[in-house]
Image (cartoon, rainbow, N blue to C red):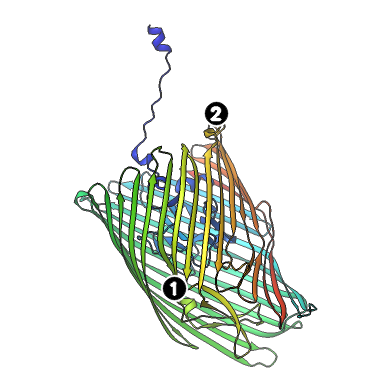
Amino acid sequence: MADEKEAEPIQKVEVKAAADTYNPRRDDTASKIIVNSDELKRYGDTSIGDALKRVPGVTVGAGGRDIRMRGLGSGYTQILLNGERVPPGFNIETVAPDSIERIEVLRSASAEFSTQSIAGTINIVLKKAVKTAQREFKFGVGRSSEMTNPTGNLVMSDRDGNFSYSVNMRGSRFEFDRNSFTDEESFAPSGAPTMRRRMNVFDRGHARALELSPRLNWNLENGDTLTSQSFFNQNIFKSTIDRGFEGDAPFYDGVHVVNQNKTSFMRSDLNWVHRFGEGAKLDATVGGNRLRSKGQWYETDARNGVDALQHDVFSGVREWGVSSTGKYSAPLGAEHALALGWDVGFTDRDDWRNQRDLKLDTGARDPRDEGYQSSVRRSALYAQDEWSLSKQWSVYMGLRWEGMETRSSGAGFAPVRNRSSVWSPLAQTLYKLPNGKDQLRAALTRTYKAPNAGNLSARRFTATNNSKLETDWIGNPNLKPELATGLDAAYEHYWAEGALFSVAAAARRINNFTRRTVREDESGRWVTTMMNNGRADVRSLDVEVKFPLKAVMDDAPGVDVRASVSRNWSQVRSVPGPHNRLDQQVPLSAVLGADYKTPDGAWSLGGSFNFRGAGLVRMGDEQYDWSTVSRQLDAYVAWKIDPKTQLRLSAWNLMARDSVSRSTFRNAQDGVSSTASTTPGVRNIRLQLEMRF
């Protein structure tokens, strides 16, 4: 009998903590996708754009700057840093992934954040808590036929009793030598060609970036916590640009530019969390930010090989702002979680530009000094309640009021004062079916998009070779916020550990839709401006599946599979069809990827294929835009040399496909004019050493 008992297999019991079983995507009433720091480390992401390319329904343009949800750009997607809107001109690609705790992708609006989120919200949350001491250093070099990009990153953190700290330092240099070309052509109404030329652009230079993000944490004796978090970023950019023409040259047929710019950005926040009795809590933050930028632009325009016009431009931006956010939350019984909060802020911006134009043939000088000042006052109050009707059914209700006042003044235009306010009622619900695997979501929201200060001012920017295709720019002080009523619905199926299948649909009706218009002014110059123009309707459908291969195959290797497809539609009512969708909307995007790790964990590798559709868009009665589809193949392999050292090789854009975009004007009186810009595709590789000590 004893031998039989010894032969019996030992039953393995795995106990998980409550924090480990909580899944915000599955359990929160508000629909959200979380990209945590572990995932950022797993893929070795060097930028936020790298991480977001894998998120269903999110598309990322070249350089990571053009981040869109539901295929909508132009400010419809809200980007937040620690819950605060990032200032104009700040590039979130400069935020190091090692300083990020998580990235929250919210498909539907919630009252806690600004409802300037017609397409959705992406909230980048920097690290706060320090659990254990950490020393980590990373150094990598990226290389392509156009650029070299060395980057170093150092993370240090530790704790001593109730005090903890963390410091993240990052430095990088980006050297580039690239070229592109643009083809312009015109045809008479009869179809006969009237102009054809190619502009070749050669751009070379370098950029340097330095980032420092320290944070200090205190756990006070009464249970309160105090956190100081700062973020400092400095970028220096220098480039030389040469533009030349083949074929029918414009009036100025040669352009030589020397450009340099230095930008510094700093933000500092102080957060206090005080806990009351019976689960109540006050979470308050006060902070400030400052941005300074100085630029020099030296441009020489030539005619028939002879220098004819010299532009010397000295410009600068000074912006500072203060803000305060807070939330008081308290449970009401066992079913309700009530929260009340505020969000107020003030931003002041001073934008100056001193331009000296010199006609080299006559010696005539034309000084064009400009000053531009703007300020934004914003305030918001909100209330929200998450109500658990049962273990399967929860409901979220929220109401937010946001008000904004924008003032701008400067040389050459009358002072502008613009006020707007929006009430945003919000409702979301989550119902978990009794089988424990399926659940349904629905949301009804009211969101908006406020015009930025630059679009409101009547300040004018001129084009050297002014035409329909190269226009001046001027703002519109009469712009109103775009208002959107949205409906979301989703079905989610969790059929195994780490396995998910979901289908999400959404619709938005946008009133006061803002679009670009091109017109000829009284002086005969072509001008682009923005104007409110009726209604637009947007619809989207997202399908996602991800699972470990072991969920469908016994004894399968450690492979994780992920795939998603997003289809987007839109229609601008004031523009005649067909193809009258929103400006630059991505109609179709898809991601297919797989990742593998060896049983001993020494090697991991993976890859993903991203597809982004494009095509024809009708911008107005006479204007059409067209662009090629994007296909991008990325891959990585990582070797864990020892428990503290890892070597990673990454490659992206392996297909190296060229990108082409075209803008066309067509009418019966003038015929057809078009311009097509081509950016060559290049392959990129990166080798990175990661060390902990």
Residue visible at 28% across and 46% down?
Answer: 161
Q: Nearer the viewer, residue 595 or 356?
A: 595
The residue identified by callout 1 is 481
Label total for image? 2
Picture coordinates of residue 199, whole percent (x, y)? 72, 73
| Residue 56 location (% of width, % of height) | 52, 51
Pick the quarter of the image with the N terminus. top left
Q: Quadrant of residue 296?
A: bottom right
Q: CA distance from mark 2 to mark 1?
A: 55 Å
Which SS class for mark 1? loop
Q: Secondary structure at mark 2?
A: loop
The image position of residue 512, as x and y in percent, is 47, 73
Image marks 2 and 1: residues in contact by CB distance under 8 Å: no
Crowd rating for badge 1 (residues with CA inside 10 Å; few <14, some 14–19, many 20+) = many
In this picture, residue 577 sits left or right of residue 646: right
- Give the amino acid type for the residue marked by disc 1 in the picture: Pro
Residue 525, picture quadrant: bottom right
**Mark 2, other Cα within 10 Å: few <14 / some 14–19 / many ≥20:** few
The amino acid sitting under disc 2 is: Asp
The label shown at residue 554 is 2
Foreground residue among 51 and 226: 51
Can residue 69 be seen here? The reply is no
Image coordinates of residue 145 in percent, x first then y, are: 69, 57
